[in-house]
Amino acid sequence: MKKIIKSLFFLSILNFTILLADAAMAADPAPPPPGSHGASGNQDPVGAPIDGGLGLLVILAGSAGYGSYKLYKAKKAEKEKEENPEDLMS
């Protein structure tokens, strides 16, 4: 019974999130600013990416390094337990 309730709760949260994202994407775009806003004629302003994804790359590399370190520590501790079973008795 708990498994069914958990899955229904998860599905309802997922459904709510998808509906909320749909509503956000369906909104009308903002009107253009009045006047020529610095461009010749009424052109859309051209945007540029702020960092080009370098920050995401740094975060992913750091996360992979941290995960590898934790995995190394876990494997090392498991190996030490297998080599020294008498330590578990005391």
Image: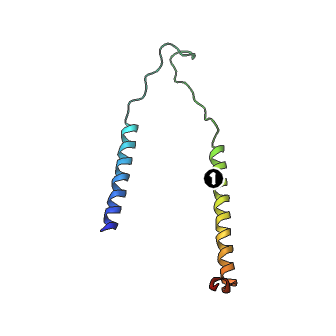
Q: Is residue 35 above or below residue 24?
A: above
Q: Is residue 76 above or below residue 52?
A: below
Question: Which residue is at the front of the view, 74 or 40?
Answer: 74
Residue lying farthest front? 90
The quarter in which the N terminus is drawn is: bottom left
Q: Mark 1 points at which residue?
A: 60
**Number of marks present in the image shown:** 1
The residue sitting at 35% across, 62% down in the picture is 6
Residue lying farthest top? 35
* Residue 20 in the image, given as x and y percentages of width and height: 37, 43
* Residue 17 in the image, given as x and y percentages of width and height: 38, 47
* Residue 27 in the image, given as x and y percentages of width and height: 38, 33
Q: Secondary structure under badge 1?
A: helix
Amino acid identity at mark 1: Leu
The residue sitting at 64% across, 50% down in the picture is 59
Q: Is residue 77 above or below residue 27?
A: below
The quarter in which the C terminus is drawn is: bottom right
The residue sitting at 38% across, 30% down in the picture is 28
Q: Quadrant of residue 11?
A: bottom left
Name the colouring of the figure. rainbow
**Left or right of 37: which side holds 68?**
right
Q: Quadrant of residue 51?
A: top right
Question: Which residue is at the front of the view, 7 or 42?
Answer: 7
Question: Which residue is at the front of the view, 76 or 37?
Answer: 76
Q: Is residue 38 above or below residue 81?
A: above
The residue sitting at 36% across, 52% down in the picture is 13
* Residue 69 in the image, given as x and y percentages of width and height: 68, 63
How packed is label 1: few (under 14 Cα within 10 Å), some, or many (20 or more)?
few
